[in-house]
């Protein structure tokens, strides 16, 4: 491979696949890394492979080999350190495409082909004044109320318009559940051109969280690997108040310099937008619980308010229309004759969590349709004969 191309790509899977479409002609021979592994195993253990050793001595000429990020999890540890041997033992490859390699893979390549490696990266949309205007416009469409929060968010992101600064922006959204914190992060990520990377440490036990944050076996998911594959330059760390304080030191360099290193990966996260959410009810509580070292790395704490009844009415009407929109004409006619919409608007104050409110509306509509189209048609005597769906206060 002395005169061959080696392209190492760091970034999202979609960007890597797009690069392959642009680089690889449809009429050339392209093999996968797993094919290389099979040939490698046959070469070192010919008696087990069933292939004659003489057939393995001649190198196979191929135009391209593609190594995808998920391939590393399918091989044993030694395959990473012996990466160069694996790709050169049985094949003459013109162009080698490698996606998000672990450190041991890139070290193996650099040891032999340092001057031949071409590095490419996902190009995340830069923050400009025009982009900030677009973010603000979309937030006003996607998020009801929270006008003060929206202004604070744009103010917090403004520093990214200055090319001299490479530090990430760290925003902490706090306040009650279900008032738009996560939806705000999704809206910003959508504006910047990709699906949101959402991390939930609250779902992990301490041992699992430790391995995820600091890296363990290369075959396991990790914080670094997930961030390296992010679709947009927005990362949501949901329920940051649930992160065990023993892990805070992992975030210091990340939030300070935009650099993250674990056992297997090193990730560049300069100018990344980190959005942390929590259910703390005041900035003083955040400062007290997180401690001065962690708190000092948060660029802006942004408080979300409870929604007004008028805002809840708009959400009820919008979600009701969304569900009605996927129904058949017959189903729509049934639902529109009930008082479901009126009941929820009259009882909007009973709902503090918008997620629960949306779920209850959806359940009410499909409960009604189940009674009419599934139960009543075969068992008319079982029909409930009432239109109000929720008679008890929501939990």
Image (cartoon, helix red, strand yellow):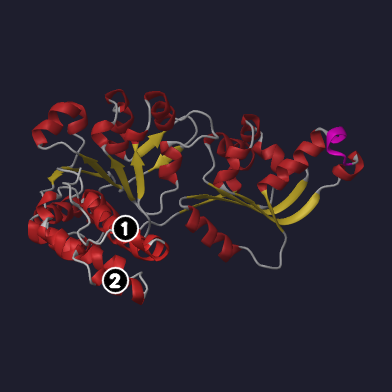
- Left or right, 161 with reference to 372: left
Mark 2 and mark 1 lie on one chain; the one further toward the N terminus is 2
Front-lying residue, 3 or 159: 159
Exactly how many numbered labels are in the figure? 2
The kind of secondary structure element at disc 1 is: helix
Characterize the magenta stretch by its predominant secondary structure.
helix
| Residue wearing tag 2 | 334
Visible residue check, residue 163: no
- Left or right, 272 with reference to 43: left
Image quarter (top left, top right, bottom left or bottom right) of the C terminus:
top left
Q: Position of residue 292 (x, y in %)?
A: 16, 27
Residue 44 falls in which quadrant of the image?
Answer: top right
- Left or right, 287 with reference to 59: left
Front-lying residue, 296 or 390: 390
Give the Cα separation between the discs numbered 2 and 1. 12 Å
10 Å neighbourhood of mark 1: few (<14), some, or many (≥20)?
Answer: few
The kind of secondary structure element at disc 2 is: helix
Q: Position of residue 261 (x, y in %)?
A: 41, 33
Q: Which residues are magenta?
A: 46-51
Q: Which mark is residue 81?
A: none
Front-lying residue, 112 or 373: 373
Residue 110 falls in which quadrant of the image?
Answer: top right
Q: Which mark is residue 367?
A: 1
Q: Position of residue 217 (x, y in %)?
A: 53, 29
Q: Residue at x 35, y 75 (%)?
A: 330
């Amino acid at each position: 491979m002395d005169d061959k191309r080696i392209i190492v790509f760091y970034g999202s899977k979609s960007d890597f696949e797009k690069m392959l479409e642009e680089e690889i002609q449809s009429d050339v021979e392209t093999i996968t890394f797993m094919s290389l592994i099979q040939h490698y195993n046959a070469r070192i253990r010919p008696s087990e492979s069933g292939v004659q050793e003489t057939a393995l001595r001649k190198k196979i000429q191929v135009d391209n080999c593609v190594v995808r990020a998920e391939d590393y999890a399918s091989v044993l540890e030694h395959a990473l350190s012996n990466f160069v041997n694996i790709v050169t033992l049985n094949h003459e490859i013109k162009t080698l495409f490698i996606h998000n390699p672990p450190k041991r893979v890139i070290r193996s390549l650099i040891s032999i082909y340092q001057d031949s490696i071409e590095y490419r990266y996902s190009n995340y949309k830069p923050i400009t004044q025009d982009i900030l205007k677009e973010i603000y416009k979309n937030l006003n469409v996607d998020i009801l109320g929270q006008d003060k929060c929206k202004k604070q968010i744009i103010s917090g992101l403004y520093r990214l318009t200055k090319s001299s600064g490479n530090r990430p922006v760290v925003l902490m959204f706090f306040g009650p559940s279900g008032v738009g914190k996560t939806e705000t992060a999704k809206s910003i990520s959508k504006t910047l051109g990709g699906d949101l990377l959402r991390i939930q440490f609250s779902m992990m036990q301490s041992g699992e969280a430790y391995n995820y944050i600091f890296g363990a076996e290369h075959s396991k998911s990790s914080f670094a690997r997930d961030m390296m594959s992010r679709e947009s330059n927005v990362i949501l760390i949901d329920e940051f108040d649930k992160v065990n304080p023993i892990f805070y030191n992992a975030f210091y360099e990340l939030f300070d310099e935009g650099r993250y290193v674990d056992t297997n990966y090193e990730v560049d996260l300069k100018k990344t937008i980190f959005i942390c959410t929590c259910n703390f009810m005041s900035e003083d509580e955040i400062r007290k619980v997180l401690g001065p070292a962690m708190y000092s790395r948060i660029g802006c704490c942004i408080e979300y308010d409870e929604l007004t009844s008028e805002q809840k009415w708009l959400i009820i009407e919008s979600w009701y229309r969304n569900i009605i929109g996927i129904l058949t004409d017959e189903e729509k006619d049934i639902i529109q004759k009930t008082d479901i919409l009126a009941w929820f608007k009259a009882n909007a104050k009973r709902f503090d969590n918008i997620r629960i409110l949306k779920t209850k509306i959806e359940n009410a509509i499909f409960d009604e349709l189940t009674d009419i189209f599934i139960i009543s048609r075969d068992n008319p005597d079982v029909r409930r004969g009432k239109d109000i769906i929720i008679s008890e206060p929501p939990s």
